[in-house]
Image (spheres, rainbow, N blue to C red):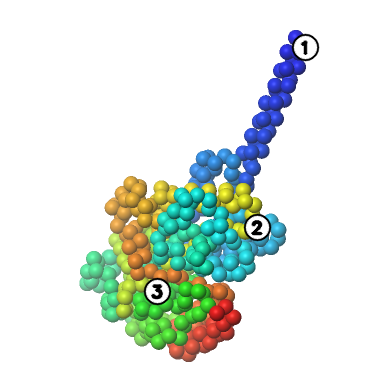
Amino acid sequence: MFNTFKNYLAGAALAIAMSGLAAQSAAAVELTMYYPVAVGGPLTKVVDGLVADFEKQNADIKVNAIYAGNYNDARIKALAALKSGKPAQLSVMFSIDIYELIEQDAIVAFDDIVKSDADRAWLKSFYPALMENGVTRNKTWGIPFQRSTIVMYYNKDAFRDAGLDPAKPPATWAELQSMGAKLVKKDSSGNVQRWGAMIPSTGYPYWMFGALTMQNDQVLMNRDGNKTYFDAPATVEALQFWQDLGSKHKVMPAGTIEWGTLRQNFLDGKTAIMWHSTGNLTVVKKKAKFDFGVAMLPASKRRGTPTGGGNFYIFKKSSPEQQQAALKLIKFMTSPERTAEWSIKTGYLGTRPDAYDTSKLMSYVKEFPPAAVARDQLKFATAELSTYQTGRVRKLLDDAIQATLVGTKTAGEALGSAQKQSDGLLKRYR
């Protein structure tokens, strides 16, 4: 009897010990992920849902998602955590942060942590245009996730009101100027009630400008991130066109236009056309009280847009186990089915072609064709402005754009000065 009781106690102790080991194993790998919420709808709920689904399938990995405001906030907080000795293991940050993150030795290349042929194939499964801001030095440093292009939203009811065909949005700069002028609506006192078009020039002016320069067949930087082309004739011509739309042709307000309020201005009917991120698509779909369309951006010498948005990065100061867990999470969130779900719920691009082959996204695109515009525009896309010293170089261009739009400098003067200062910052990287 005593031996039986002793065996029972031993068995119970073993069971408790095994239970403890199982619990310890279940919590063996904990990940902290910084995530920006800069544009679009209730992204935190969508990301939380994806993380919860991942944790259900991977009980041994715990993910703590920290929402960090905009992209700059996410980068600052992630790098501060890195320096404090309590680093995150992964983050979604600007795709254009790649050179700064490499220079600070903050991130690890995915090529160095993938192990299987399937993983290596996964690295090649994304749209090439989206990988331009994630690959350098023949290695992949960033994986596309919250990615976008700039698209043209337009109010079809306003087109009808102006006597324009709502099925034919402007396809060229000349049409943007002429149709935009017809779309301007004034009251009896001459006050503008509705502008023809608005291109935002705060927040991310360099991004909008990258579209205009690409449409004029001019990129803003080289592929090595150590030279810019701010004073190229086609760059200057593009900025002059932007300024002329407001100050000369009166298609849009002269001066600067706020990024943060533009979407609401469009929803309120204060502009017939807006250029904005495809990441706004789901919100506009839900909130627009008028018939609207989405189109590719118009062309000068060609069509063009920069890609935009955020990539996944894995931080170097993490254990091999954490890096593998982070890789597993990123692969889960970028799988075709999850990518399709993400695109439908947010309006952001499906980052890989096979996402558009899923029944879910195929049905959505058939029901709502604007969801395919950003994808189709990728064939005309280029990399977003990204260089070494990217924050300082970007600010030089932002300041030049805004100085031109408000009329304190000519396009040539502003861009010439920005190029000279950019050369000074980048010459040591050549």
**Closer to viewer: mark 3 or mark 2:** 2
Residue at image coords 22%, 72%: 163
Question: In what element is the residue under mark 3?
Answer: helix
Disc 3, disc 2: CB below 8 Å?
no
Instruction: Say which label, 1 or 2, has the lower sequence index.
Output: 1
Residue plotted at (23% across, 66% down):
167
Q: For the N terminus, give its image quadrant.
A: top right
Amino acid type at image mark 2: Lys
Q: CA distance from mark 1 to mark 2?
A: 54 Å
* Label 3, label 2: how far apart the Cα atoms are: 36 Å
Furthest residue in direction top, as rendered: 1
Measured Cα–Cα span from mark 3 to mark 1: 83 Å
How many C-alpha atoms fall within 10 Å of the one at disc 3: few (<14), some, or many (≥20)? many
Q: Secondary structure at mark 1?
A: helix
Query: In which quadrant of the rendered image does the C terminus lie?
Result: bottom right
Q: Mark 1 = which residue?
A: 2
Examine the rendered structure and indicate whether residue 9 appears above or below residue 285.
above
Amino acid at pointer 1:
Phe
- Residue at 28% in and 65% down: 156
Which residue is denoted by mark 2 in the rendering?
Answer: 317
Looking at marks 3 and 1 on the same chain, the residue that comes earlier in the sequence is marked by 1
Amino acid on which the number 3 mark rests in the picture: Ala
| Residues tagged 3 and 1 counted as in contact (Cβ below 8 A) | no
Count of numbered badges drawn on the protein = 3
Q: Quadrant of residue 84?
A: bottom right
Between 163 and 16, the residue placed more toward the observer is: 16
Residue annotated with mark 3 = 211
Tell me residue 124's x, y (percent): 43, 57
| Residue pictured at 57% horizontal, 78% vertical | 429
Residue 204 horizontal/vertical position (percent): 48, 72
In-front residue for pair 325/86? 325
User: Is residue 10 visible from the viewing direction of this image?
Assistant: yes
